[in-house]
Image: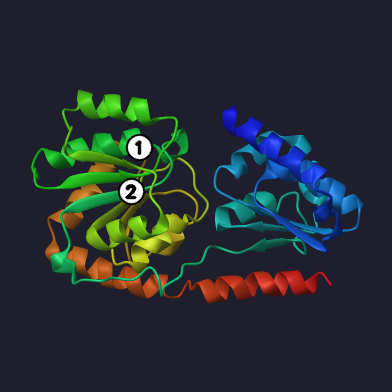
Amino acid sequence: MRRLISIMLASLNLILNKKIYFNDLVHIHHIFYFFPALILKILGSKIIITVHGSDINKIKRSPVIKIILKRFDRVLCVSHKQYKILSHFISKNKLFYIGNGVDVQFFKPNRSFLDREKIILSVGNLRWQKNYNLLIEAFSIVHKNHYDWKLVICGEGPDRKKIQELIEEKKLYGNVLLKGYLNQDEIKEWMQLSRIFVISSKVEGFPKALLEAAACGCACVSTNVGDCDYFLKDVGSIAENNKDDLSKKILKLINSPTLINLNSTLAIKKANSFSWKEYIDLHRNIYNDLF
């Protein structure tokens, strides 16, 4: 609710800012900015929206949002699963899949894999979508036989208290570290330091953090959400949404130095095919096509 109020206030500020009325093209990244976007549409602007991770759940539940999306000039989505859902009511000449991009000049390894620490890393807001309870439950299984490994979670959010309570309940204090909000340089350092990167989410689009961690050389594991399976095919592991299978996939990497090293090498190569330049060029082509 707090986030919704914040977005509504931001929308109001946009409407009151007369400078935005003179833009030929406006690209929004959240469905709740639809009101200023529709006003600008009436005034002659071209409107593009990118649908991200959990947005698709709101869209599926709301006939009103579906009608609004049809009014936009282009609808972009970040996963093939989203595209399939949106194609049921958005015409294909308006709908485009554009995954995500990563700056491979910034996110890159800075040490050999064997020089990394025994860290399992996850990055994202402490919200229900990220499902950190599942990750901590899975790590508690891993920790039983691998006391020297740590779980580091970078991010802040409303679920911090619940997560801290679970850490205490599982007696993992000191082994699971909540680092809070970090800037991009700090996140990169953790990705370069860690051996394994895990996404335990209930819902995603095509998470940037996965691309960034892969580009830094982490061996990656994810639940089967969004386009994670698409990216990790042949270069990482997809786990079922339960603690036993997630811990099994993590343990498989920990127990096999050859596999974890191979997945690290393959992840770097795969991430380099999702360069930031290609991502920008795809957007530029869509923008130009509107004029």
Rendering quarter of residue 267: bottom left
Compared to residue 116, the image places residue 247 above or below, namely: above
Work out whether mark 1 precedes mark 2 in sequence or the reverse, and give the earlier one: 2
Amino acid on which disc 1 is placed: Tyr
Neighbours of disc 1 within 10 Å: few (<14), some (14-19), many (20+)? many
Residue at image position (19%, 36%) is 140
Q: CA distance from mark 1 to mark 2?
A: 9 Å
Neighbours of disc 2 within 10 Å: few (<14), some (14-19), many (20+)? many
Answer left or right for 131 relative to 143.
Answer: right
Residue at image position (28%, 70%) is 109
Q: Is residue 184 visible?
A: yes
User: Circle 1 sits on which residue?
Assistant: 132
Callouts 1 and 2 close, C-beta under 8 Å:
yes
Amino acid on which disc 2 is placed: Ser
Residue at image position (77%, 64%) is 93
Circle 1: element type: helix
Answer left or right for 151 relative to 184.
Answer: left
User: Circle 2 sits on which residue?
Assistant: 122
Residue at image position (35%, 75%) is 269
Circle 2: element type: strand
Compared to residue 196, the image places residue 180 above or below, namely: above
Rendering quarter of residue 264: bottom left
